[in-house]
Structure formats: C-alpha cells, structure tokens
Image (cartoon, rainbow, N blue to C red):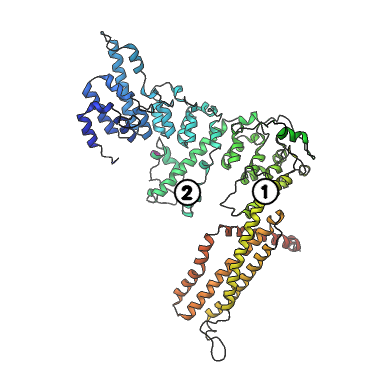
Amino acid sequence: MHDNWEPLKQYYKRNWEEVFIPLTTNDDTVLHVVAYAGQSDVLEFLISLVTTATNDPRKLRHALVLENGHGNTILHEVVASGNLKAAMLLVSHDNSVRSELIARQDADQTNEYERDVIDVWSRSIVEIQNKLGETPIYRAASYGHTKLVDFFHKQNVNIERHFTRSVDRMSVLHIAVINQHFDTALWLLKKYPFLAKTREDDGFTSLQLLAKMPSAFQVYNRESLWKMLIHKCLSEDDSVDAAASNQNGDIESRWIPQLPTACLSKKLTRWPRVFSILKQIKKEKTLSELTQLLVEKDYSWVESKKPKKDKTISLVSSQKDIAAICGDGRETKKSTIYNYTPLLIATSTGILPLVKRIYEVHPQAIEAHEIGSQQNILHMSIKHRQLQIFRLVKRSRAITWRLTSRIDSDGNTILHRAADMTYYSPDTQSVSGPALQLQEELRWMVRVGKITPPHYIMHRNNKGVTAEELFNIEHEKLLHSAQTWIKDTAQSCSTVAALVATVVFAAAYTAPGGYNSGGVPVLQHSPLFTTFIITGVVSLISSLSSLVTFLSILTSPFEYKNFHHSLPLRLHLGFAFLFFSLVTAMLAFTATVVLLIHLNEKLTWSLFYVAAFLPVSVFGMQLPLYAGFSHALIFIFKKVRKFTISFFPVKEILNQ
C-alpha cells in the first residue's frame, strides 16, 4: 500500500515456504500481489528465493502456474500491470524450468518424474487460460499493452488459441476495440486482417462495435478555448507523428513530453494537461487509421442492398393492416441492432467521421438498408435526429431522391420518421426548454417535408395514419409542456421587465446632484450626466418593449404552428430587450455614482465596465436559453435581407 517492499522481502527471506500460501479472499499469493503491483525486482527476489531454497524445478514451476480464485497465474497479473520487464522475467524462468524438467524426465531411471505430469508442465505459461478463457496475450490486448502483445507473439506459441475468449467467443480485436485501446487493435488488425470479419456471440463485428461508441469519436477540444487552441496547434504538427512512431508499445510509453511543436515550446508540452492532449491526438489519429482498415474490409452493406419488395403509397386506412399488427395477436418482426450495417449503426449513434469514411470508401453503401425494417440511412438519421448526417446525405440530390422514395416495413415514409418520437432525445446543450424542443421538432418536419415526394405527404402507414396525424399524436404531451413552460417564463420575465421599467421611470425624475434655484440640474453640463439621461431612456424603452413582447406571448393561441417561428422569436426578443434594459440600467446607476463621487478617469471607466456587465454576465450564464437569441437574430437578418433584395435588386442597380 505504501510501496515499502523491503519488510516483505525480509519476511519471506525467513519464511520462503509461505510464498505459496494465499493471502487474500481471491486466493492471491504474495507472488500474485507483487505481480499485479508491477514490482519486477521484488518478483525476481521471490522467485530466486524459491529456486535457491528448494533446488527443485518442480517447485519453481508450481509457483509459476499457481492460480488464484479467478484462475489467473502470476503472468496474468503481470500483464494487468503492463510491466514488460516482469513478463520477460517470468517467461525466461518458465522456458528454463520446462527445459530442465524435460531433460530430467528423459534421464530419469526411478520414475520420479512422471511423464503425464511433465507433459502438462511442458506447456508454456503464455498459453495458460484463466476461468474466463483468457490467455496472457488476450489479457494484454484487453488492457492495451501493445508491447506485451508483441513480446508474447514472438514466443513461438499457437496464436490461434489466443484469438478468442472461450467463455463468450469474444475475439481479441473486439476486446481491444471495446476498451478503446485503438493502437493495440490496429496492431492486431495489421497482423491478422481476418479478425475484422469475426463476430462475437451477439453477432457484432468490430466495426459494428466501433459504430456503437460515439464517445470514442467525440471532439476533445470543445471543453475550453485554450484546449482547443493547443489541440489545433499540436494536431497540425507533423513532428507529433514522427516522435510517436520512433517507439513501440502502448500510448503511455510512446508519448514523451518533449515533442517540438509549431506554436508551442518544448517546456509547454511538459505540462500534464498538454501531455493529456498529446495522448488524445495520438488516439484520434490511431482511431482514424483503424477505422480506415475496418471500413475497407467491411462488405456487410452488399447483403442488405437488395430490397425484398418495393412498397407503394396508401391514401386510405387499411383495417387489414391494422389487424395484422395489433388485432389478431401477431407481432411484427423486430429487428435486432446487429442486423444493421455499420453505416446504419453509426448513423443512429451520430458518428459523423465514421459515416463519412464509409461513404468515401464504399459510396454504394449509402443506398443499403436494414433487411428487416427496410430502413435506409435517411430513415435512421431522421428518426434519431442526426442533423449533420442528414445534411451530408442530402448533398447528393440523385441519391436523396432514391432514398426518399423508400417506405419501410411498417409503411412509414421519411416524413413519418420525422413525426415519430420513439427515439427522441433532446439536445439539452443547444436546446433548453420544452418550447424550443417543440420548435426543433417542427423544424425537422419542415426540413424533411422539403425533400419528401409530394404524393407521399398524404400516405398512411400500416396503422392508418399520415405523418401529420402521427406528429400531432406523438407530440401532444410535449405541446402541453411547451404551453405551460412558455406561459410561466413569459409571466416571470414580464414581472421583471415591469419592475425595471418602474425603477428607471422613477430615476428619470431624480437628477444626480439635485437642482439649482431655477430648477435646472446642477450637473447637466457633465458628460456623465448626458450618459445618465441616455442610458435611462434606453433602459426604459427596452424594458417596456420587453414587457409588451412577453404580454404578446401570453395572448397567443399556443398552437403547433405558433411554436415554429412566432413564439420562440418573441421569447428571444423579449429576453434581448430585458437583458439590454438591465445593462443600460446598470450604466445609468454607475454614471450616477461617478457623478456624486469624483474619481480618476481610469478608475471611472473600470467601474463602468464591471458594474454594467458583471451582473448581467452572471445572470446570462444561469440562463442557457439566452444563447438561442443568436438564432433569432440570424432569422431576422435573413428575413430583412430577403425583403430588401426583393424590393431593391442589387444586380439591376449595378447594371444601370
């Protein structure tokens, strides 16, 4: 626990026979504990203790193959620590003791060394499996220790025994991918390309598993601005790859914090946080190379490209179809996710880099569909609300037209998928509040409706409902939540706006410094007095505008169509006016304070900035909803620009 191993060495030096006695509830001996801790020198001391004390190779062999409660030998535990030196030590001792045992058996005249025992002991410890069926090579791959995998691979072993775990048939490539040890997975794939096509018990290939791991593809540099800049600088520097390729092994051993960079000094790369970014860059590049190899070897899309039967549109409700689904007790065949191609899985999880890579290597795969549900990439991107992938597919008009005409096995068009909330999961980082979530759903209906064939709009699925009817049914609860939320928000904000207007209106009739005998403000000639008047008036106008905007929200009918543009736009404008009134009110207050207490110029402006923007910034950080104001501004700008161009054609004016 305290890394003080000297007392342990002294104890077992006096009591060497206790080396074989279990110490923990998992039946770990001291050899297992030391091996897991990665203490190669202590491990060598204990092994030499057994060797010199007994001078019997059978005792040493017994120590090397001794298993704990999980069936792990000492080598299994060393692999977990990643200590290459300790692994080399154990393999070296094992090779020596096996050779000696075989030699003694051949020279044995008294049958002291039984042949069947020697045959068992002649097997290398590298090939011994634990209770899960994991060999040390498999275990090294699961921990991402590439150096150990490479070392064991060179030990003249039957490598096929190490490809799978016997308890669940999980391949060594699968386990490396699942644990996100992509450098180890890349090493395995280059050595044994056929592993790319192997499937585990649930039927997943390694590429399908990778497509189910969106966290592995997440952009690391979104956490903060400075991390984004460092990540950008280091990722564009070729010396990062050069330094990494000079060494073999796992990520930790490859990355040395002395990499020269284009815009960062060597000293900066020694910082722990910068070092972690370096490791992430290496991981991203390794993942990119691994993805490329897996995609090149994947042809699962070929099997799912041919449709069983094309479905036609239906404009009337079919009672027969409805009975077939829910009236006569029969159930539709549910598609399991491993039937999906890696492209469809990556689409459902939103892994854009993987979708792009598959599209680049196998452009034909874009038209493939899932055999059971008859859903293509467009169906998947819409029902899982993957906007970036939807836009990627929509770029090719020819392909888009063919994909939009596909009706799945449930009779759903792509517009039905936009109306369905079965897989709905709101993006709380960019959309806050039920009203804006409903707006985003309405936007999906609009953007999908634009590419839907016109004669598909009135199509009814197997349940006899159109896309619009399905949308109204699925979003009924969200509509009620949005109505309640926007009413409460508008009422609360209108109260604040009225309070600000009251305070500013009263302050407008109270001049700082008072009035002279003629009723004229004493400080009227001061520039700060003018600032006080202007900011006070602007604050009053903004607060009243905000109040009117929120009151207009409260008088709206709150129908679906109102949540598409009207209500969210008013809400954003109301927040903008309210925040602006708070800023100008604080400026007016600051001007009053500076007028009454005479300060130097530098301190005056500092007080202005702090007093005006700090409270508003704190308030703004507590309201992510205000971030949506930018969308409102963009929408207004587009409308004004479109209106201006329609009335004032720029090209015609320039040509005159």
Residue type for callout 1: His
- Residue 262 within the magenta-colored segment of the rendering: yes
What SS does tag 1 mark? loop
Q: Is residue 77 visible?
A: yes
599 up-or-down from 520: above or below: above
Farthest-out residue, bottom: 517
Cα gap from disc 2 to disc 1, whole angstroms:
41 Å
User: Residue 533: in sight, yes or no?
Assistant: no
Q: State the image coordinates of residue 599 (x, y, percent, origin top left).
A: 44, 78
| Residue furthest left in the image | 14
Q: Which residues are magenta?
A: 253-263
In this rendering, the answer to whether 388 lies above or below 539 is above
Above-or-below relation of 299 to 426: above
Q: Tell me the quadrant of the picture where the C terminus can be found.
A: bottom right
Residue under label 2, please give it: 231
Nearer the camera: disc 2 or disc 1:
1
Query: Alpha-carbon neighbours of circle 2 within 10 Å: few (<14), some, or many (≥20)?
Result: some
Q: Which residue is denoted by mark 1 in the rendering?
A: 475
Q: Foreground residue, 157 or 32?
A: 32
Mark positioned earlier in the residue sequence (2 or 1): 2
Q: Residue furthest top?
A: 109
Which residue type does callout 2 highlight?
His
